[in-house]
Amino acid sequence: MQSPGGALKEALLCAQSEGRITAGVYESAKVMTEDPDSVSFCVLAMDEQFQCDIALQIHFTLIQSFCFDNDISIVRVSDMQRLADIVGDKAEELEDAHCVLITNPSEGSWEDPALEKLHLFCEESRRLNDWLPEISLPER
């Protein structure tokens, strides 16, 4: 069975190849506000900057609340740089990977099995009262 970290990496790479990734706190908030039904999954990266940035903590709280209210699965990772390496364009540095969204695949396309595993992982975590489970991304 694939680990949640492996499934997350696979889902992110699949979504990236299909153009279904939104990265950045403000960009993600905009997508969630304009079309919340298009969002399938949310990843929050909590790093050292998060501990010192009150504004970022407030944004995270609002994003979490929005995800809970709209039945969007959400996880956290502790390695923002690793997340940026996975979803970022190799040609340019990804400035803000604190929040990454995966939007739904287009109508008629296959569901992503890795994303389904993540939804099940989140569902099971909620049953155990872990509303924001942490996933460790695998090394390169």
Image (spheres, rainbow, N blue to C red):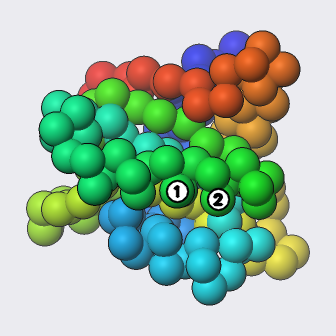
Please report the residue visible at 68 percent of the width from the left and 81 percent of the height from the top.
35
Q: Quadrant of residue 103?
A: bottom right
Residue 93 location, x and y as percent? 13, 62
Q: Amino acid at mark 2?
A: Phe
Residue 134 location, x and y as percent? 50, 24
The residue wearing badge 2 is 66
The residue wearing badge 1 is 62
35 versus 110 height, above or below: below
Q: Are marks 2 and 1 in contact (CB under 8 Å)?
A: yes
Residue 17 location, x and y as percent? 48, 64
Q: Quadrant of residue 139?
A: top left
Query: Depth check: 65 or 139 in front?
Result: 65
**Residue 122 is at least partly visible in this image:** yes
Q: Secondary structure at mark 1?
A: helix
Q: Quadrant of residue 125?
A: top right
Q: Amino acid at mark 1?
A: Leu
Please report the residue visible at 16 percent of the width from the left and 38 percent of the height from the top.
52
